[in-house]
Image (cartoon, rainbow, N blue to C red):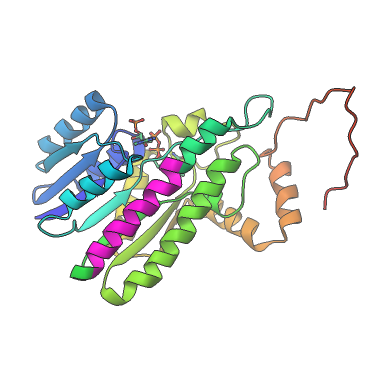
Amino acid sequence: MTRIVITGATGAIGAALAQHYAVPGNHLTLHGRREAVLDDVASQCRERGADVTLSCVDLTDDVSLHAWLDTLCEPSPPDLVIVNAGMNINIGEFGEGEAWDDASRLLEINLRVPMAMGNQLGKRMRATGHGQLVFMSSLAAYHGLALTPSYSASKAGVKAYAEGLRGWLAPSGVGVTVVMPGYVSSKMCHDMPGPKPFLWQPARAARRIAAGAARNRARVSFPFPLDFGCWWLAVLPAAVSQRLLAWLDYAPPAATRDASSPRQERPHD
Ligand SMILES: NC(=O)c1ccc[n+]([C@@H]2O[C@H](COP(=O)([O-])OP(=O)(O)OC[C@H]3O[C@@H](n4cnc5c(N)ncnc54)[C@H](OP(=O)(O)O)[C@@H]3O)[C@@H](O)[C@H]2O)c1
């Protein structure tokens, strides 16, 4: 029996991944916070012939997370773990900036939790010389976006962490894949400001992610035109990338400032 763990299984991509892997012979452990939605996803997966276990453990609580991961590693670590749960915030309609409480919560689930999971599962998988870890980054990891600075930072962090983990775990036969999606239809995606070119449906994204994970690809990034464009943002001088992003409408609304507090204008470098 192949054992697969998916966090964020109540979300669009996580549920699509669960359905993709829901075949006889697979045991799915699905994690989500919204029990009713999770039950729904589980029923669909069971109908397709998979065995399903559910978890609503608080991923952001170290003690609960470590205990849960220990359970998952009995009698041996899972074959595949997809660290998918995540959130997004933005600078607001008028570009007023992110609330720090929100940014802090975002860093917790988008970066600290994936690192905690990679840290613990990586060691357990390394000891048995078997397993595949998949981390959800984003094309926003190539170059920070003005509308979503904390999200961009968290996804750049996940990308770098997973790349490092891949190098560490490769000699022991454990695989690590970084997934960098463009726009995939989901609540998170549609709540985000800015244009959403080349939007994919979650089922298509799930197929691409699963194919990449099965081949232990270092990076699974899509869709091609957007991936290629975003990759250039990392390669070009940062000043050029910033201008390109503004030109493509990924810029904050024009700043409004109090006329009574004049500030020195600085040239953009
Ligand atoms: N959709 C895109 O365009 C896109 C692009 C690039 C990367 N991604 C990444 O893909 C992943 C899945 O996103 P999605 O598009 O499927 O979004 P989604 O539909 O909004 O799903 C997000 C999932 O993350 C879970 N989650 C959020 N905060 C959590 C927390 N504190 N603790 C536990 N679970 C939490 C949610 O659980 P609840 O249901 O309980 O809230 C939900 O299952 C995310 O990591 C996202 O950053 C998405």
Q: Which residues are magenta?
A: 108-126
Q: Tell me the residue at 69%/38% (across/down).
A: 249
Relative side of 263 to 223, left or right: right
Relative side of 6 to 50, left or right: right
Report the image quarter containing ligand 1: top left
Q: Main secondary structure of the magenta part?
A: helix
The quadrant of the rendering that contains the N terminus is bottom left
Name the one closer to the observer, 180 or 175.
Answer: 175
The reply to whether the magenta stretch includes residue 131 is no
Q: Position of residue 40 (x, y in %)?
A: 20, 28
Relative side of 75 to 17, left or right: left
Res 204 quadrant in image:
top left
Q: Is residue 199 visible to the viewer in this orientation of the structure?
A: no
Q: Is residue 212 visible to the viewer in this orientation of the structure?
A: yes
Q: Tell me the residue at 90%/22% (across/down).
A: 260
Q: Tell me the residue at 41%/41% (across/down).
A: 109
Residue most extreme to the front: 63
Q: Position of residue 54 (x, y in %)?
A: 18, 37
Relative side of 169 to 91, left or right: left
Res 261 quadrant in image:
top right
Q: Position of residue 116 (x, y in %)?
A: 35, 52
**Considering only vertical position in the picture, is 77 above or below 268?**
below
